[in-house]
Every structure is written in structure tokens, then in C-alpha cells.
Image: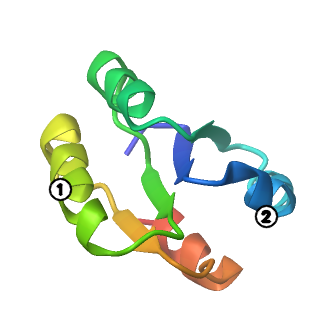
Amino acid sequence: MNSSYVIFFCDECDLLKETITHFSGFYPEVKVITFEDREKMMAHLEKHEPPRLVLVYVTGPDKEYISFLKAIRQSINSSLIPVLIYHTLPSEEEVGKLLKR
């Protein structure tokens, strides 16, 4: 995978500032793009090459994000790109393994 960026989608990105900063320091070669707006993220995915990883961090109920996950999958049109939905943040080790794919 040649992409050099990951997407963090979060319904409350202010809660993740420290995590995103830490992630960027841990993987300086990987650009982090954040979105809080679903439509803006979907527009980005349609116009750019697929990212290496999409992390969706949500605090709302699971059911409302199932259709969102399906839309992301259809937009990037590849099952090779990990798209993960979390209610708690993944560990650095888990993210590192995904980036090595």
C-alpha cells in the first residue's frame, strides 16, 4: 500500500488531540487527517487515493455507524484497507500492526 496517510474520524475530535499528537510522533512518516463531519470525510475518500487505515472513534450507539461503515467500504472500494470502529481507543501496538499490513 503506497498511501502515506491515515484517517481519524471522531464525533468529538477534541477528546483525541493528545492521542492524535502521540500517534503522529510515533509514526512521523504517516500523515494524519481528522474529520468530524461524515460528508466531508466521504468527499475526501472519493477524491483521493485510499488511506492506509481508517479509525472511526465514536461515542454514540453502534447501530447508527453500521451504515456509515458500509458507506466507507463502498467509497474506498477495497477490502485491503482496515476500517475500524472504536468506542475506546486502540492500543499503539494494535495500530502499529495495522500500519504494517
In which quadrant of the rendered view does residue 17 lie?
bottom right
Q: Position of residue 3 (x, y in %)?
A: 45, 37
Q: Position of residue 36 (x, y in %)?
A: 56, 41
Instruction: Indicate left or right for 35 with 15 as reference.
Output: left
Amino acid beneath label 2: Thr
Label disc, if present, on residue 44 of the rendered structure: none
Measured in 3D between alpha carbons, the distance from the residue under mark 1 to the one under mark 2, in whole angstroms, is 26 Å
Mark toward the viewer: 1 or 2: 1
- Residues marked 1 and 2 touching at CB (< 8 Å): no
In which quadrant of the rendered view does residue 19 lie?
bottom right
The residue labelled by disc 2 is: 19
Label 2, residues with CA under 10 Å away: few <14, some 14-19, many ≥20: some
The residue labelled by disc 1 is: 67
Mark yes or no: residue 80 visible. Answer: no
Instruction: Indicate left or right for 78 with 51 as reference.
Output: left
Helix, strand or loop at label 1? It is: helix
Along the viewing direction, whichever of 9 and 94 lies nearer the viewer: 9
Which residue shows up at 56% across the image and 54% down it? 10
Label 1, residues with CA under 10 Å away: few <14, some 14-19, many ≥20: few
Which residue shows up at 78% across the image and 51% down it? 14
Instruction: Indicate left or right for 79 with 60 as reference.
Output: left
Along the viewing direction, whichever of 70 and 11 lies nearer the viewer: 11
Amino acid beneath label 1: Ser
Instruction: Indicate left or right for 76 with 17 as reference.
Output: left
Which one is earlier in the sequence, the residue at label 1 or at label 2?
A: 2
Helix, strand or loop at label 2? It is: helix
Which residue shows up at 33% across the image and 31% down it? 42
Q: Position of residue 85 (x, y in %)?
A: 40, 69
- The relative height of residue 80 versus residue 74 in the rendered view (above or below) is below
Q: Position of residue 34 (x, y in %)?
A: 61, 40
